[in-house]
Amino acid sequence: MWRIELDAPQYPEGLVLQLHANKIAGDVEIINGLNHYIGMATLHTENFFEFKIIPYIMGFFSLLSLVIAFLNKKKGLIVFGVVFVLFVILAGIDFYRWNYEYGHNLDPNAAIKVPGMAYQPPVLGYKELLNFGAYSIPDTGGWLLVTAGFLLSLIIIKEYKFSK
């Protein structure tokens, strides 16, 4: 769904943290080892309830889209669009909250302390964190959601434009 790519001189091949719908993957153990020095919490799939519910949410959207296509009602299309937009907004807020907590709640006994420094990864885009460059971008599943939202918008516009 999403990925955070980390680049640093000591890792010329880069490190990747991949957020799937149901798990955290990529170079998690290396990232956890590095983050230990600056006091960040370790990442484990089981610590995030989101990985338990997102697969069901994706299934719900899939089923709902089939039901709406079968019923062929404009009102259902609008409801689907509103629910989809609300999901995207809530997911963005949750991801920001997760990044904030992860980057600001540091262990005071960490080996490396930089006064005033927080290590919050960007929600989207690039941010420099000490000697690491962090790129936060959609992965395959995220781009599929962007495409689905774009297509849904086109369908809603088409339905309302041609019905007048």
Image (cartoon, rainbow, N blue to C red):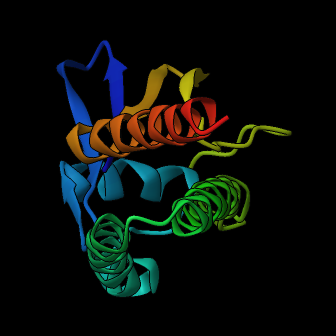
**38 shown above or below 74:** above
Q: Residue at x 44, y 25 (%)?
A: 135
Relative horizontal placement of residue 113, taking residue 66 as reference (left or right): right
Quarter residue 102 falls in? bottom right
- Residue 143 is situated, as x and y percent measured from the top left of the image, at 31, 35
Can you tell which quarter of the image residue 162 is in?
Answer: top right
Nearer to me, 19 or 119: 19
- Which residue is more in the foreground, 147 or 4? 147
Q: Residue furthest front?
A: 164
- Comparing 89 with 114, the one in front is 89
Q: Residue at x 83, y 39 (%)?
A: 115
Q: On the rendered structure, is 117 left or right of 89?
A: right
The answer to whether residue 55 shows anywhere in this view is: yes
The x and y percentages for residue 90 are 66, 64
Q: Nearer the viewer, residue 48 or 141?
A: 141
Q: Is residue 110 visible?
A: no
Q: Please tell me which residue is depicted at 67% across the width and 53% down the height of the picture.
A: 96
Q: How many marks?
A: 0
Seen at 24% across and 56% down, the residue is 28
Is 95 drawn above or below residue 53 in the view shown?
A: above
At which x and y percent is residue 10? 26, 20
Q: Position of residue 75 (x, y in %)?
A: 61, 66
Name the image quarter holding the C terminus: top right
**Can you say whether 144 is above or below 154 in the image?**
below
Residue farthest along the right direction in this orientation: 116
